[in-house]
Amino acid sequence: MAETRSDRGGLIVGGIIMLLLGAGLLFVCYSVIHETGQCAGETMRAGDSCQHTKRSGAGYTNDADEEKAANHSTAWWTGGMGGVLLLGGGAAVFSALSPRTVSVPAAAQSSTRTSVHPPQPTPSARYVDHTEALSALARGEVLTFGELSLDTSQLKTSKGVLAWPQIKQVKLDGSGRYIAIFRHGKVLPIMIPLVTVPNSALVVTLAEQLRLGL
């Protein structure tokens, strides 16, 4: 079950209370351990005695050294409890403030992994036969080959859409690494990397036929 904000708030409040209690007990420990023997709030001297009476009515008497030893025993016990509370409170606050790792369901992880994969060739890229591709164009289909899409009226590239009358020529460039699209009134062609265009030879042939209106 996911941890809610109220759960984290409860941890923080509880941790702070434990820290305050632990600090208080350590302060008491420090104060008592440096005291000489005390009896009824007064400092005992050598030869003094302190009478203690239990609820049962029984009693016992401590001299100054015994009273000091008893105080030290109480101080060490108090200090130990204070240390435990400090550690527990610190751990609770740290746990509440530390960032949580959000678990992602397997289906969501699969969806995320799929979304970062490079796009697969569109169904139009299945056309490797010239005759089939022409038939598809005649039926009004838009054929998409990676970065280029074409139909009977236009050629769409990643750099814009061109109607066929705007295009002067479509061919493979001299390096064999690009498709060059020459436009009327433009000196420089649009260069499309071959690696982004499946069946590039077929695309060039179709583009030239559509440009010429064949």
Image (tube, rainbow, N blue to C red):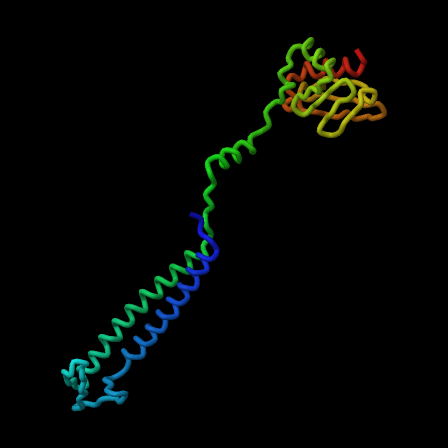
Q: Tell which residue pokes out farthest to the top in this image.
A: 131
Give coordinates of residue 59: x percent, y percent.
15, 84
Identify which residue, 188 or 135, lies in the foreground: 135
Give coordinates of residue 1: x percent, y percent.
42, 47
Q: Tell which residue pokes out farthest to the front in this image.
A: 56
**Which quarter of the image is occupied by the C terminus?**
top right
Would residue 127 appear left or right of 11 to someone viewing this image? right
Identify which residue, 53 or 44, lies in the foreground: 53
Vertical side of 189 occupied by 2: above or below: below
Give coordinates of residue 102: x percent, y percent.
47, 46
Residue for point 28% across, 68% down: 80
Residue for point 43% across, 64% down: 13
Vertical side of 122 occupied by 130: above or below: above
Vertical side of 124 occupied by 77: above or below: below
Would residue 117 appear left or right of 168 to someone viewing this image? left
Tally the numbered discs. 0
Identify which residue, 14 or 76, lies in the foreground: 14
Q: Tell which residue pokes out farthest to the right in this image.
A: 185
Instruction: Name the image quarter holding residue 199.
Output: top right
Would residue 28 appear left or right of 174 to someone viewing this image? left
Instruction: Name the image quarter holding residue 46.
Output: bottom left
Would residue 144 appear left or right of 15 to someone viewing this image? right
Residue for point 81% across, 13% down: 213
Give coordinates of residue 137: x percent, y percent.
72, 15
